[in-house]
Image (cartoon, rainbow, N blue to C red):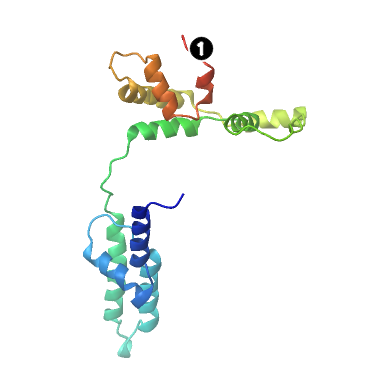
Amino acid sequence: MPPHPTTLQISDSLTELVTTCSNYSNYRKCFAESSGFRFPILGVHLKDLLAVHLALPDWLEKGRVNVAKMQQLYSILNELIHIQSLPPRIEPSMDLVNLLTVSLDQFHTDDEIYKLSLLREPRKAAPSSPTPPKSPVINEWASAAKPKTDPELINKHILKMVESVFRNFDVDQDGYISQKEFSIISSNFPYLDRFSVLDENK
């Protein structure tokens, strides 16, 4: 399927913006005219720092500091420091943050990950050979290496996630998740394969 014309147009405009022609003149002009939160192309600014450093000496005659060089270096560095202090004009979705936090806090063994992988993409070829049994020593080491999750922290994140689910998916705001609402949840989170085995009446 060919890319959408709008996508191609955006791609062409971005390519033109970052072209190296005339020492990145398109980028430099756009960067100078813009304000607020920006993503600088660090390579261009580092190139400027290097050019100033190599082109101008640190010291002038009679041991005087080259103030012009220091001012140019300061100007470049100050601009980059200023950009880091400007927050983006977007607000994080705390519902998504809570969901991701809970997801990252969960621990799966290699066997569990393998089974989840097979659920997502079943093997079509000949059945694979069974995983060789682990020795008791390896099992003991693996259980000791398993990270100890903080139940309090997990509960806190799960409560926040549950609040998010009810806030976003309890359409009629009756304090319960109906079968219809649950189907919306499961379609939004397709990786929760274990939901598909639940009794629909429950």
Image quarter for residue 136? top right
Q: Is residue 52 above or below residue 201?
A: below
Instruction: Name the outermost residue toward the front.
Output: 1
Residue 105 in the image: state x and y as whole percent. Answer: 49, 31
Which sits in the foreground, 33 or 183?
183
Image quarter for residue 15? bottom left
Q: Residue at x 24, y 67 (%)?
A: 32
How many numbered marks, from 0 up?
1
Name the residue tied to disc 1.
199
Which sits in the foreground, 181 or 38?
181
- Is residue 182 found left or right of 122 in the rendered image? left
Image quarter for residue 129? top right
Residue 39 in the image: state x and y as whole percent. Answer: 33, 58
Instruction: Name the outermost residue toward the bottom.
Output: 61
How many residues crowd around disc 1 within 10 Å: few (fewer than 14), some, or many (20 or more)?
few
- Is residue 171 found left or right of 144 in the rendered image? left
Residue 127 in the image: state x and y as whole percent. Answer: 73, 31
Query: Which amino acid lies under the numbered mark 1 shown in the image of this protein?
Result: Asp
Residue 25 in the image: state x and y as whole percent. Answer: 31, 73
Which sits in the foreground, 109 or 16?
16
Q: Is residue 114 above or below residue 181?
A: below
Instruction: Name the outermost residue toward the top.
Output: 201
Mark 1 secondary-structure assignment: loop
Q: Is residue 112 above or below residue 75?
A: above
Which sits in the foreground, 85 or 62?
85
